[in-house]
Image (spheres, coloured by chain):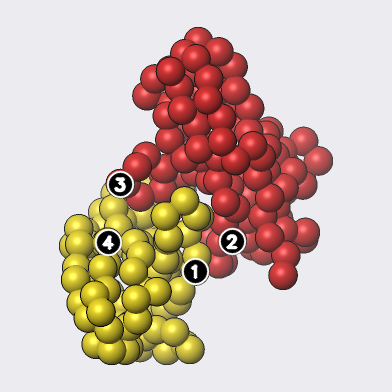
Amino acid sequence: LAKTTQPISMDSYEGQEVNITCSHNNIATNDYITWYQQFPSQGPRFIIQGYKTKVTNEVASLFIPADRKSSTLSLPRVSLSDTAVYYCLVGDRMDSNYQLIWGAGTKLIIKP
Amino acid sequence: EAEVAQSPRYKITEKSQAVAFWCDPISGHATLYWYRQILGQGPELLVQFQDESVVDDSQLPKDRFSAERLKGVDSTLKIQPAELGDSAMYLCASSQTSIFAEQFFGPGTRLTVL
């Protein structure tokens, strides 16, 4: 079964670029990698999704190496409002069953 | 903007009592998920519906938990009897299709079992 590993917490400062890496050593070959953001007392919110190489949207970039054993979420020029928990989500297939595997989350704290 | 609705937002109950949570997904979303999130941990999928059918309930403690989505729209998650260890946030999410689609989460129900 696939397993994801993320740093428990990270600190950074306003205006900096923040990179959060998730290791996922055994995801299914045709599955996407998705990242979510969660604020306290709220449900997670979709940030970005990718399959390979690099994906960019208006809020983040996602880098996925060729072996797809990890992915890096990049947040450019963070602000205080980016303080949140960030989760990577991958899928795994065991026999004919498909399961969603959430990481334990990375608590990102942005300082002024 | 359409949102996933959940009720109640907070529930306090005593152990051995029955509790029920309700979720109304975004209109047109065929896939509905129920998650349990313990404080400080990531979401744990309890059950996934595609329309009215259960796709995955492998992590649902079936001796005490049940879930239904009778008409393929809104859904109810029930716990009977509740145990102290069930205290958590229960999140509902929906998506247009299954597997890779973006999931839209509701605000959750915070359950406290005394």
- Counting other residues with Cα less than 10 Å from the Cα at mark 3, is it few (<14), some (14-19), or many (20 or more)? few
Separation of disc 4 and disc 3 at Cα?
9 Å
Task: Tell me if residue A97 comes above or below residue A56 in the rendering.
Answer: above
Q: Is B90 in front, or is B99?
A: B90
Camera-side mark, 3 or 2: 3
Quarter of the figure with the C terminus of chain A = bottom left
* SS class, disc 1: strand
Mark 3 or 2, nearer chain start: 3
Q: Chain of mark 4?
A: A
The residue tagged 4 is: A107
Camera-side mark, 4 or 1: 4
Same-chain status of marks 1 and 2: no
- Chain seen in yellow: A
The residue tagged 3 is: B40
Task: Tell me if residue B15 comes above or below residue A54 in the rendering.
Answer: above
Q: Amino acid at mark 3?
A: Gly
Camera-side mark, 1 or 3: 3
Q: Is A81 in front, or is A71?
A: A81
Q: Chain of mark 1?
A: A
In-image side of A76 versus A38 (left or right)? left
Separation of disc 4 and disc 1 at Cα?
16 Å
Separation of disc 1 and disc 3 at Cα?
19 Å
Q: Amino acid at mark 2?
A: Phe
In-image side of B51 versus B32 (left or right)? right
Shade of chain B as shown in the rendered figure: red
The residue tagged 2 is: B104
Residue farthest along the right direction in this orientation: B71
Whether residues under marks 1 and 2 lie with C-beta atoms below 8 angstroms apart, the answer is yes
Q: Chain of mark 2?
A: B
The residue tagged 1 is: A46
